[in-house]
Structures are given as C-alpha cells and as structure tokens.
Image (cartoon, rainbow, N blue to C red):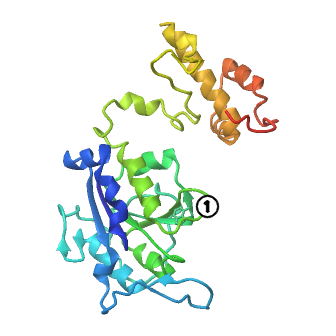
Amino acid sequence: MRVDVVTIFPDYLAPLQLSLLGRAQRLGLLDLHVHDLRGWTEDRHRTVDDTPAGGGAGMVMLPEPWGLALDAVHRGEGAGGPVGAAPTAEPGSDAGDGAAVELAAAPDEPADGRPLLLVPSPSGRRLDQAMAHELAREPRLVVACGRYEGIDERVLLDAAQRYRVVPFSLGDYVLNGGEVAALALVEAVGRLLPGVVGNPASLLEESHEQGLLEHPVYTRPPRWRGLDVPDVLLSGHHGQVARWRRDEGLRRTARRRPDLLEALAAADPGALDRADLAVLAEEGWVPGGRRPAAPSGD
Ligand code: ADE
C-alpha cells in the first residue's frame, strides 16, 4: 500500500518509522511519503492560512497550496517532483469540469479508480476497526492534515473530482490538528496489511474484531503482589480457557461499552448465544433493555 500524508508538521509523523510500521516500510509492505504543505506555497513567508470568510476566531487553511499539493500527490509527486514508484494510472481522474461534487460518506463507495483522500476532522465519520479493514484493502491512501479551524471547504469539493474524499474523526473531542489522527489511522490500517503483524491469528482476537472488547490478559509469574492469574488459564483446558475469555470479554463489554452489545445484537441477532446472554444477564444487560447503572471501574 502507498500512503501519502500532507501536513505542515512532517516531523509529527516521524514515529511511523519505528517498530512494526518502520519494519513494514523497510520490507516494502508500506510505501509511506510525508510531504510538507509549505513546499507548495509561493510567497516569501510560505503562508498556509488566512482569516475566516465571514469573520470569527481562528484561521483557515488557504486553498492554493492545498490545491497544488493534492494535484501533485495525485500524480505521485512531492513538492520537488516525483517520489517513490509512480502510482497506477487512474481511469476517470481529472474530470475537471468544475461541477459541484459531494464528499463520500464512507470509503466503500464504488472505487472508479480515484484514490481515497482521508481528511482528519472532528466532524468526519468515526474511525473504527471495520473502517480500518476497508482502508487496508485500498492500494493507495492520501491523508490531508488540516490545522487551525480547518481547510477551506472548496479544497475538498475540488479534490472530489480526483479523489474519493472521506473526512474521518478519531472521536468526539477536538485535537489541534489532523496529525495525531493521521498517525492513528496509518497505524490502525498498516498493521492489517499482509505480513506486517507476525501472527495474523492474533489480530482476530483483539478488541473490536468480533464486535466485543477483548478479555483481560495475564502472563508470568502466577502470583504477583498477592494477585493470582485465574486458575482456568493455568489449567491447560483449551475449551474452558476459550469460554472464560469469551465470558470476560462479554462482561467487560457490558460494563464499559454496552453500546457495542446493542450494535452487535442489532446487526446479527445470532451473534450472542444462550450462554452469552446468561453471562450478560448477570451484568444486568439484556438485548434492547436495561444497561448497568454505573461503570464498575473494572
Ligand atoms: N482534528 C481535530 N480534531 C480531530 C478529531 N477528533 N479527529 C480527527 N481529526 C481531528
């Protein structure tokens, strides 16, 4: 997968050189290019922002540098010319007729050869594990990191002629800019690429993969500061271990994220069997019904 990130703070993305994603790049599994937006400014001060039309607080990112940047990155270029292998030819690109275009609500609209342009924004679609899986199937992602009050809306409307534009949010809180969201996105997607995580089976057991939170985990020693590893985990009974893990995942989900249980039950009524429902009832959760009064702090 090729990923291009455009930002005014390229150093923010430096941690992507570390650990698994650094290794993925060295192995050629992830082809990451980070671009400084100021490379596409044309004035002496390398200006990227101006006051908002209509007045108000803060600054808005200018359309000119963003337009040039997204045009160049679409062609596989950086501010100084081509970078990395040329991206594959994209039919249907550069429509260029100036027609009003809508932004894509989700990455799964028909691909028609346009690469995805992901725009971090507190008003975007919430990034979740299902979306990370969708994105991991794409050959190419471009991430446009805004700062200040955001990017002039015309940049995204114009870009939609060449890209499938998807604003996305990390959660219902406001960050100073899109860089932290870009880091999270590239890590969440990058670790799903084939060969990046050593044991792919481990990916399936994680929180959010089955619509539930993951069970607690333990390692050696069996007793630490008076706290024991649960006996069942040392029993060698694989069936009992699996049931205990399922039950603990269910309990944790009921206490911390009952919304996930509601969503799971609504999406697939067969996803929770009788044994599951019995465990959940002990936690005060019944489908479509009462939820636990208060988080237990577990
Ligand atoms: N930029 C500012 N806040 C954000 C958020 N919550 N998610 C993604 N990008 C953002």
Q: Is mark 1 within 8 Å of ligand 1?
A: yes
- Label 1: state its secondary structure: loop
| Whether residue 260 can be seen here | yes
**Given the current orientation, which residue lies at the most extreme front position?**
225
Q: Nearer the viewer, residue 288 or 240?
A: 240
Q: Quadrant of residue 280?
A: top right
Residue at 63% in and 87% down? 56
Where residue 1 appears, as percent x and y from the top left, is 28, 52
Q: What count of labels does the image hold?
A: 1
State the quadrant of the C terminus.
Answer: top right
| Whether residue 270 can be seen here | no
Residue at 55% in and 88% down? 52
Residue at 70% in and 36% down? 297
Within-10-Å neighbours for mark 1: few <14, some 14–19, many 20+? few
Where residue 21 appears, as percent x and y from the top left, is 31, 47
Task: Identify which amino acid the numbered label 1 is placed on.
Answer: Tyr
Where residue 265 appears, as percent x and y from the top left, is 67, 35
Where residue 161 appears, as percent x and y from the top left, is 40, 74
The residue wearing badge 1 is: 173
Residue at 30% in and 82% down? 40
Q: Nearer the viewer, residue 49 or 140?
A: 49
Vertical position of residue 280 compared to residue 23: above or below? above
